[in-house]
Image (spheres, rainbow, N blue to C red):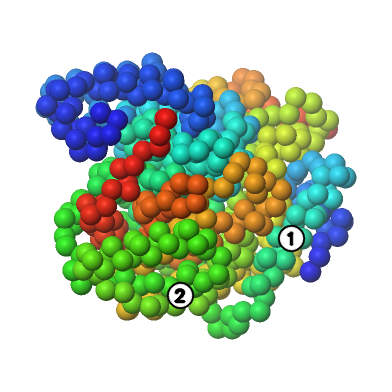
Amino acid sequence: MFESSLKQMGDALRARKISSVELTQSYLDRMARLNPQLNAYISIDAEKSLAQAKAADARLAAGSADALTGIPIAQKDIFCAKDWLTTCGSKMLHNFVSPYDAHIISQFNNAGAINLGKTNMDEFAMGSSNETSYYGPVKNPWDTARVPGGSSGGTAAAVAARLCAAATGTDTGGSIRQPAALCGISGLKPTYGVCSRYGMIAFASSLDQAGPMGRSAEDLALMMNVMAGFDERDSTSLQRDKEDYTRDLNKPLTGLRIGLPKEFFAEGMGADVAKAIEAAIAEYKKLGATIVDISLPNSKLSVPVYYVLAPAEASSNLSRFDGVRYGYRAPEYSDLADMYEKSRAQGFGAEVQRRIMIGTYVLSHGYYDAYYIKAQKIRRLIAQDFVEAYKQCDVIMGPTSPSTAFKLGEKGDDPVQMYLSDIYTIAVNLAGLPGMSIPCGFGDNDMPVGLQIIGNYFDEARMLNVAHQYQLATDWHSRAPQGI
Amino acid sequence: MSLSTQDVEKVARLARLAMSPSEIETSRNQLNGIFGLIAEMQAVDTDGVEPMSHSQDLAQRLREDKVTESNQREAFQAIAPQVEQGLFLVPKVIE
């Protein structure tokens, strides 16, 4: 059952071949056995999950089930879920039991899906290796000496190790796509504004976007049908007609124009990654696609622009953590200012404090134009490069990450080296475009390589089609780590 | 550009983060590394380019001015560090 697609699971549940309680319990048993070595989950609450499973079984018996009714889905611990501990990977929220549901959580609840637990993540989604989590690093199921990527590393590891049927992630600069690549799974970051940010703990509001992570493009399409949709409680949620993201899965790829940005195939990419990406492109040619050489001349500026904009927005968003209304408060302090300063210094980890410092500086008096406004201007140049590129091609492809999963601790001391691991993903967030990563082979040390597929605005259904057709022709996505 | 110890102390104060002198030094070194990366931006010609904050360039959506949330004081206060008689407690601010 752990290898079944979401569609197969749903069919088996609706045919009453298995109950949701049985399915949920089998995942909980597997999590009890494997989570201690992977640390993919921060919170597991069998009683709550099984209560939802029981309700799902009643709905299945009544014949009113939806596609995901009864299916156990893991939720990144950035999503507020009522009565669940919601930590965002931080000591700051070590005792925060959410009084309400995020929009995404309500959507899954309404669909009758089971919340199987809250997955580990980099603190406040700031990190590319999951090592900044207050709850300890997640281990990559393909090699437990290596990182799973980040920030949605717990989700990626849980999906790869079959500790859930599928799961949610969020992506501000690559946090769905990079861990998906490093753990050999599929992940989709939708167009900015497609999934509501309500109840999703904010990092950088103009870039944050929720999306699905799973074992196949077909699974992601079913997840998108639940996650996408307008929500008036998110001021940047887009009012659009409801889509069926599975509608184009079976279209042939004949005539598809794939743009390859020369900047993504220049220096910096590992030779093992390059080999796997080239093989994937060759497979797409066999499937009928044509290749177009394109250029994204400003994409090299993505990392500096991102490390102005994201910390600036983070420093504003994280000012709400003051030890007054919820979360951590320092045990000893002399006055109000001291309480703020000590609560924040003790409650936030080093990387979060670093980004708050960068953001506070670039927004401070005298520097706003030189940094924040300058970065927003270059952001437009980066977005315009994509607009030009899509005049010549339908999708853009390249590597998701310059290397396969690195070792725990390998980049620990140098923030700049860590930031550069998101070099191919960040431009997509800055432009607000949809991007995904699918497994396309293995590199050095038998670690998975991810192929990045970038679509035009609102082109998620086409991207899922492009990924699904590749997954029909290859079996990289169905490989599972040994010994797990 | 290079940040001084005083610059970093000022930013830490603005950000309400208590830092020891050795933490200020570590932070200074790391911030200087990161601002070295960010400095690449300054060479780009952005004359006449409009700053971009949202990919769809949408206007802020407005709604009717009416109450949409119910009062959940008890639920919200149950998770607060220190409360009394429905109030959030902080150290004395006004003498």
Vertical placement of residue A315 versus A23, above or below: below
Apparent side of residue A148 relative to residue A353 in the rendered image (left or right): left
Q: Quadrant of the N terminus of chain A?
A: top left
Could you tell me which chain the residue with mark 1 belongs to?
A: B
Q: Which mark is residue A262?
A: 2
| Residue A217 place in picture, x, y as percent | 28, 49
Apparent side of residue A98 relative to residue A111 in the rendered image (left or right): right
Task: Name the residue beneath numbered marker 1.
Answer: B33
Residue A151 visible in the snapshot: no
Secondary structure type for disc 2? helix
Q: Residue at x 79, y 26 (%)?
A: A332
How packed mark 1 is, by other alpha carbons closer than 10 Å (few <14, some 14-19, many 20 or more), is some
Q: CA distance from mark 2 to mark 1?
A: 28 Å
| Residue A137 place in picture, x, y as percent | 58, 35
Q: Residue at x 23, y 54 (%)?
A: A473
Q: Mark 1: which amino acid?
A: Gly
Q: Mark 2: which amino acid?
A: Lys
Q: Quadrant of the C terminus of chain A?
A: top left
Residue A185 quadrant: top left
Residue A286 visible in the snapshot: yes
In the image shown, does A420 or A375 lie closer to the viewer? A420
In the image shown, does A181 or A328 lie closer to the viewer? A181
Vertical placement of residue B81 versus A446, above or below: above
Apparent side of residue A12 relative to residue A176 in the rendered image (left or right): left
Could you tell me which chain the residue with mark 2 belongs to?
A: A
